[in-house]
Image (spheres, rainbow, N blue to C red):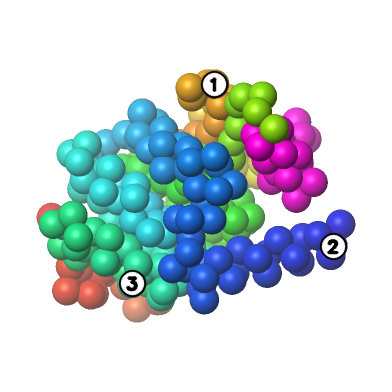
Amino acid sequence: MARKVYLMERFFWLLYHPLAWAYDTIADAVSAGRWQKWVRAILPFVRGSRVLEIGFGPGHLQMALREAGFLAFGVDESMPMIKTAHRHLQRTGVVPLNLVRGHAEALPFACECFDCVVATFPGAFILASPTLTGIWRVLRPGGRLAVLLGSTIGGNSLYVRFLRWLFRVTSQGPWPHSLYRSMTERLSNLNYVNVTWENTDYNGDRLLVLIAQKPVGVETIERHGSELSRQVTSDGNTNCSG
């Protein structure tokens, strides 16, 4: 099991860094061409107006969020992915000012910036306590976390059956109920409320979406001068105003 986890982590690191140029091709291959549609399926779960996407990759959801009228921000650790997203957005006439480099465990935004934080098909880091704590910090009271954790592809063609087998042997899904219980408990311990797991049908595929909320009526205390309290602006420095 440990070797399998190591190999998967190594594969994803290569995909997000030196192989970032091939990300869309590989994603389409392992989803039978459905990847970008799955990514957009998170939109009905987004709330508010100011949205942060963690791990924006090639930038497809960034475009979809903007088209839907949201004020979208994005953070990604991978410089090759950031460059790919810039090229993609610029080709569609969007100036990608709100994309920054950073780690999910130490989001480079001020407290209570966003109405919603989203991620689609992220790595295991998204469920780590430091990441969830950082997300809680940047959410406004009543704000929502929405994570598309994975999918189970529908259909009965030989290729689709092969993909389901591949996802299963690489531990990419389906997910055991023990994961739901342990993660619900972790989120509750980190002061999230209204934790739900949505197994939603999307054109015959099954998508697993995690929803959690920061309680209304809480106040986040910001540590001035710390790395976490930097402000992000469109000129490359962080600012959540506007």
Q: State the residue position of label 1.
A: 204
Task: Decide: is 21 above or below 61.
Answer: below
Give the prevailing secondary structure in the magenta stretch.
Answer: helix
Q: Classify residue 216 as left or right of residue 50.
A: right
Task: Decide: is 194 above or below 188.
Answer: above
* Residue appearing at x 52%, y 70% in the figure: 19
Mark nearest the camera among 1 and 3 is 1
Camera-side residue of 194 and 4? 4
Q: Earlier in the sequence, mark 1 or mark 2?
A: 2
Task: Decide: is 37 above or below 66.
Answer: above
Camera-side residue of 163 and 234? 163
Magenta region: which residues?
159-182
Q: How many residues crowd around disc 1 within 10 Å: few (fewer than 14), some, or many (20 or more)?
A: few
Q: State the residue position of label 3.
A: 83
Amino acid identity at mark 1: Gly
Q: State the residue position of label 2.
A: 2
- In terms of secondary structure, where does tag 1 sit? loop
Camera-side residue of 229 and 173? 173
* Residue appearing at x 84%, y 65% in the figure: 3
Amino acid identity at mark 2: Ala
Q: Position of residue 124 (x, y in %)?
A: 63, 55
- In terms of secondary structure, where does tag 3 sit? helix
* Residue appearing at x 69%, y 32% in the figure: 158
